[in-house]
Image: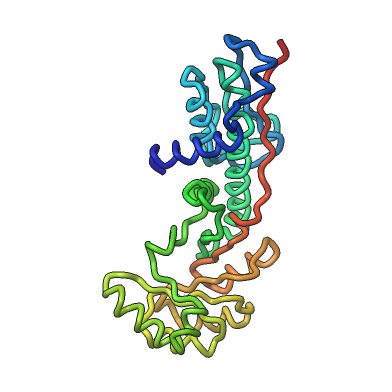
Amino acid sequence: MSDLFLDAFLRAALREDLGGAGDLTTEATVAAGALGGAVAVARQPGIVSGIEPFLRTFTLLDPRIEAERHVDDGARVEAASPIVTLSGPLRGILSGERTALNLLCRLSGIATATRGYVDLVAGTRARIVDTRKTTPGMRALEKAAVRHGGGHNHRFGLYDAILVKDNHVAIAGGVAQAVLAARNHAGHAVKIEVEIDSIEQLDEALAAGVDSILLDNFSLETLREAVKRVDGRVTLEASGGIDECNVRAIAETGVDIISIGALTHSVKALDIGLDIPMA
């Protein structure tokens, strides 16, 4: 993520919290020149992600705030582990606390959940990837968190890959028609993936000359059948209804990719606090 994008995003988040009047509580209780320190501490085990936006939140408020990183993004931490130590003007630290923690906790939650899935499929060929089911405005940050957790990214947006989904197929009149239209529009250099929802569509997708096939909500039996029929000719992606209970079995069918929307759309934030010692 470029600094230009990150700063614009963080400024909007800070404006949402500070409004036009600023931090009324901190300005009432903390002297303007007060200096001190604070430590971001993990309250539970997990994988850290989001340190850069966390730190940038504070320096946008007051560039005099300094930081010491104790871990890097992608590191595993235990409960009570320090993540970052801040020092400098306390007004800036307190005013940025909630915005910075919201980001660090959510992104670390995504990285932690991703690592859990990655560990569950270890030893198989399957890669864990995300989807476009992200928080509006936070996609780049959330997809970075997936990478910090050991996962991989699917397309970033509608602009960087062609994925012919079920509604496109329905409107076009079939898999072959939709893929042909996409190929004629995109040219030979762009890879095309098509989503199918039945084993009967598999041969049609292969005949259409796609590069990848998304198997939507297939049973384990039909996933195995699809892998056997394809025999490595194209990339196979399994998606839909995937959780911690079935991801290993899905990986063992031999699919190449397992995409999981829950990594970003319904993940639980990692519990991280910002502790300031008593004066």
Instruction: Name the quadrant containing residue 248.
Output: bottom right
Question: What residue is at 54 percent from the left and 33 percent from the top?
Answer: 54
Q: Can you say whether 49 is above or below 80 in the image?
A: below
Scheme of colours in the image: rainbow
Front one among 35 and 39? 35
Image coords of residue 50 (percent x, y): 53, 39
Front one among 258 and 233? 258
Question: What residue is at 53 percent from the left and 51 percent from the top?
Answer: 146
Q: Can you say whether 103 is above or below 276 in the image?
A: below
Image coords of residue 208 (percent x, y): 37, 85
Question: What residue is at 67 percent from the left and 63 percent from the top?
Answer: 243
Question: What residue is at 49 percent from the left and 76 percent from the top?
Answer: 165
| Number of disc labels | 0
Tell me if 269 is positioned left or right of 160 in this view.
right
Tell me if 180 is positioned left or right of 127 in this view.
left
Image coords of residue 7 (percent x, y): 44, 36
Q: Can you say whether 5 is above or below 253 in the image?
A: above
Image coords of residue 227 (percent x, y): 51, 79
